[in-house]
Image (tube, rainbow, N blue to C red):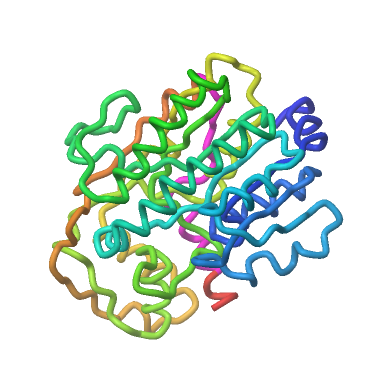
């Protein structure tokens, strides 16, 4: 990060929605460390107060408890904001299959509220969490931003609609946007609890308890697992870029390497065994495939490198070691 980028962050008021969530809380911490004035918004539906408890007394942090489905709350949070990092959403493909209405209300209705509030507040740039689920049934690897398939879940539909709305708000209201298609983000503060917990924290917690993780399918499905610090870098690139050609685009946010679930469990057992040797002997079990799951996911990050200057520092193994250490120290 160069001096101009740092100065820009120090002089900016940045709203982070979903601030008490996994990605949002990490973004808030980093931005505050860089000297930004940060407003965090969350309704604690899936986020946790503990994730922001250390930030509440920070002189440059303001917290707004509110739901993005409430337009008035969105307007309040956007007051005076230069940039918005919109992370708030109801994640999880299975959750959306079980309850498509609520996923749509939050991910589409709430997203539209945030766009409207950002437009009304004169926000300079609206950066939002898109999703690799948008690639749907496209079998092409690696995934390239301009080539998507049909969505395989209500969640995927909502995230694609977000991209359509963002494009429309640029054309209609001249609101600059940047969409970041996250690929299986993992790292510190990611919640291992609950029915819709992501695979890495869930498996880590189970292995630490000497419980057998259950892989959906035969373990051959693969993902471009992406460490949180790469995602933070991408958001900062999206805020600070002065390349006008980079705006009003969507970008894969990933590292650009693929790991199968079988390979993942081998690595988790290896890294956790450094803290507890008995974890090496925990068995892995297999269950049925989940509806809506994309078999394989691998991102091309060429577009982000070329237009945003994205340069991820953490490959999957390096990030996984960091994440395992954090979970061991904090769970």
325 in magenta: yes
Give 82 or 309, whichever is nearer the viewer.
Answer: 82
Give 221 or 238, whichever is nearer the viewer.
Answer: 238
**Residue drawn 42% across and 57% down?**
90
- Give the quarter of the figure containing the C terminus: bottom right
Image position of 147 with respect to 154: above or below: above
Q: Is residue 52 visible?
A: yes
Q: Give x and y (percent) for residue 240.
A: 67, 28
10 in magenta: no
The majority secondary structure of the magenta stretch comes to helix
Q: Is residue 248 left or right of residue 64?
A: left
**Residue drawn 24% across and 59% down?**
97
In the picture as drawn, the residue positioned furthest to the right comes out as 59
Q: Give x and y (percent) for residue 207.
A: 37, 78
The quadrant in which residue 140 appears is top left
Give 94 or 286, whichever is nearer the viewer.
Answer: 94
What span is colored magenta in the figure? 307-326
């Amino acid at each position: 990060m160069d001096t101009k980028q740092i100065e820009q962050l120090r002089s900016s008021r940045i709203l982070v929605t979903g601030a008490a969530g996994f990605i949002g809380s990490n973004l808030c911490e980093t931005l505050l460390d860089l000297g930004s004035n940060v407003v965090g918004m969350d309704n604690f539906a899936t986020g946790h107060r503990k994730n922001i408890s250390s930030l509440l007394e920070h002189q440059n942090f303001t917290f707004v408890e509110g739901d993005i489905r409430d337009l008035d709350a969105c307007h309040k949070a956007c007051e005076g904001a230069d940039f918005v990092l919109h992370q708030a959403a109801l994640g999880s493909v299975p959750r959306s299959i079980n309850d498509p209405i609520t996923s749509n209300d939050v991910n589409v209705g709430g997203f539209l509220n945030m766009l409207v509030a950002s437009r009304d507040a004169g926000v300079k740039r609206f950066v939002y969490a898109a999703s690799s689920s948008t690639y749907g049934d496209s079998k092409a690897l690696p995934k390239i931003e301009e080539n998507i398939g049909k969505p395989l879940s209500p969640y995927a539909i909502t995230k694609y609609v977000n991209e359509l709305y963002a494009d429309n708000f640029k054309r209609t209201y001249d609101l600059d946007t940047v969409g970041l298609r996250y690929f299986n983000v993992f790292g510190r503060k990611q919640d291992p609890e609950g029915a819709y917990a992501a695979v890495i924290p869930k498996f880590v917690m189970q292995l630490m308890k000497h419980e057998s993780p259950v892989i959906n399918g035969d373990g051959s499905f693969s993902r471009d697992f992406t460490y949180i610090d790469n995602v933070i870098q991408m958001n900062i690139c999206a805020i600070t870029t002065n390349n006008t050609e980079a705006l009003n685009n969507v970008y894969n946010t990933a590292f650009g390497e693929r790991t199968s679930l079988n390979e993942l469990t081998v690595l988790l057992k290896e890294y956790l065994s450094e803290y507890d040797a008995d974890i090496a002997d925990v068995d892995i079990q297999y269950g049925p495939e989940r509806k809506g799951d994309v078999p394989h996911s691998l991102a091309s990050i060429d577009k982000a490198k070329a237009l945003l200057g994205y340069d991820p520092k953490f490959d999957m193994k390096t990030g996984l070691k960091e994440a395992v250490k954090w979970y061991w120290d904090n769970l």
